[in-house]
């Protein structure tokens, strides 16, 4: 009887602890407004329309997804790498970004501020202290304790997307993407968003630079809502005569890019690679990317150049009033991130 009594008490305690954890997670649930102004300036820099501009975008994988890593979400086993390797990755990422000093617009995704998975390194501070430029961070993953995987929980995650800019924008705004996972999964998942910087130009219109990171591990329904929201936003800005550049990690391929161009398509239960529909944007809008270079590698295993499946899911979208001069993927061999950076030169048409 005592065994049953103690077993019952233990079960009751476990249920109360679980209920308390769920209540706490609901209380601390990150739920920002649809539109959140991060920064405003009364003296922004004016962008001359006759100049050649450049933009770089890179998902840095919170400096925790180097070529030594596999990841449990992608069919691997690991949750995080070693502290030493994470620091090495962060140092290498910072060094690379310092070499991009001549690039006026830099868009970064998966940057941790205070997370267990990256050993609580403040990566925002690590990066921006090397740049005498404007910086804006839009949080998109703020959870006090992620309980999966049960054997080695991810724990605290505070992460976001960061836009660095040599010219001072007139505003930096976080726009929440619609859609959430079912309850209670939503309590421990990302709140996707786009980060929008707006710059005046010498022709009276504005340059709109969008940093975006779309959903990955869903059934496609969240990504569909996010894409529709993004399309409506950029079409509205373009209708006002503005110039629009969108860059980031789309977690899908551009239209007409072969899914198996860089090897057999590894099938993950949690991530199904797909293409954006060719008629998704009206005529004149351009998808800018380097068709010969992959931008992402799968994390079902440590990186093997000849074996690991690679794909192209990082690229730019530009409005019809922008001329794309050049674009390239910078091949870093996925040494310090599961993504390669992408770079585009462009010019605003009068």
Image (cartoon, grey):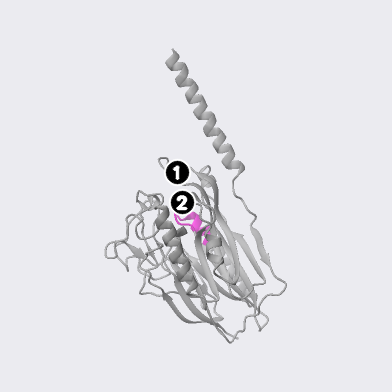
Query: What percent of the width, then of the height, locates residue 276?
Result: 44, 66
Query: Is 207 within the magenta?
Result: no
Counting other residues with Cα less than 10 Å from the Cα at mark 1, is it few (<14), some (14-19), or many (20 or more)? some
Query: What percent of the width, then of the height, locates residue 261?
Result: 32, 69
Counting other residues with Cα less than 10 Å from the Cα at mark 2, is it few (<14), some (14-19), or many (20 or more)? many
Relative vertical location of residue 292 with respect to residue 91 in this rendering, above or below = below
Taking 34 as reference, is 100 left or right? Answer: left
Q: Return the residue nearer the eye: 62 or 119.
A: 119
Query: What percent of the width, then of the height, locates residue 227?
Result: 52, 62
Q: Earlier in the sequence, mark 2 or mark 1?
A: 2
Q: Residue at x 44, y 58 (%)?
A: 87
Q: Residue furthest left?
A: 306
Relative vertical location of residue 267 with respect to residue 195 in this rendering, above or below = above
Q: Residue at x 46, y 69 (%)?
A: 95
Q: Which residues are magenta?
A: 215-227
Q: Residue furthest front?
A: 84
Label 2–label 1 contact, CB within 8 A: no
Mark number displayed over residue 153 = 1
Query: What percent of the width, then of the height, locates residue 120?
Result: 51, 52
| Residue at which label 2 appears | 117
């Amino acid at each position: 009887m005592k065994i049953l009594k103690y077993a019952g008490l233990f079960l009751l305690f476990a249920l109360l602890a679980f209920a308390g954890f769920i209540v706490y997670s609901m209380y601390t649930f990150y739920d920002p407004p649809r539109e959140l102004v991060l920064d405003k300036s009364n003296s922004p820099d004016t962008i001359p329309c006759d100049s050649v501009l450049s933009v770089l975008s890179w998902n840095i994988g919170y400096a925790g997804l180097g070529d030594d890593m596999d990841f449990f979400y992608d069919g691997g086993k690991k949750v995080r790498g070693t502290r030493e390797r994470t620091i090495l990755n962060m140092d290498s990422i910072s060094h690379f970004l310092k070499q991009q000093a001549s690039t006026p617009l830099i868009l970064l995704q998966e940057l941790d501020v205070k997370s267990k998975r990256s050993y609580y390194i403040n990566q925002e501070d690590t990066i921006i202290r090397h740049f005498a430029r404007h910086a804006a961070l839009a949080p998109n993953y703020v959870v006090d304790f992620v309980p999966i995987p049960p054997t080695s929980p991810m724990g605290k995650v505070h992460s976001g997307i960061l836009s660095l800019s040599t010219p001072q924008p007139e505003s930096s705004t976080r726009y929440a993407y619609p859609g959430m996972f079912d309850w209670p999964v939503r309590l421990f998942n990302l709140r996707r968003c786009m980060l929008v910087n707006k710059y005046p130009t010498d022709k009276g219109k504005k340059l709109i630079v969008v940093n975006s990171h779309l959903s990955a591990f869903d059934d496609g329904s969240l990504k569909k809502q996010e894409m529709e929201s993004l399309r409506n936003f950029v079409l509205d800005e373009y209708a006002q005569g503005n110039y629009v550049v969108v860059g980031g990690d789309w977690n899908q391929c551009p239209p007409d890019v072969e899914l198996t161009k860089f090897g057999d398509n590894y099938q993950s239960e949690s991530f199904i690679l797909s293409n954006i529909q060719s008629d998704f944007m009206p005529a004149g809008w351009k998808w800018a990317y380097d068709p010969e270079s992959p931008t992402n590698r799968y994390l079902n295993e440590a990186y093997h150049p000849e074996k690991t499946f690679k794909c192209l899911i990082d690229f730019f979208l530009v409005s019809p009033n922008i001329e794309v001069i050049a674009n390239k993927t910078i091949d870093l061999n996925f040494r310090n991130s599961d993504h390669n950076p992408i770079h585009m030169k462009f010019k605003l048409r009068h």
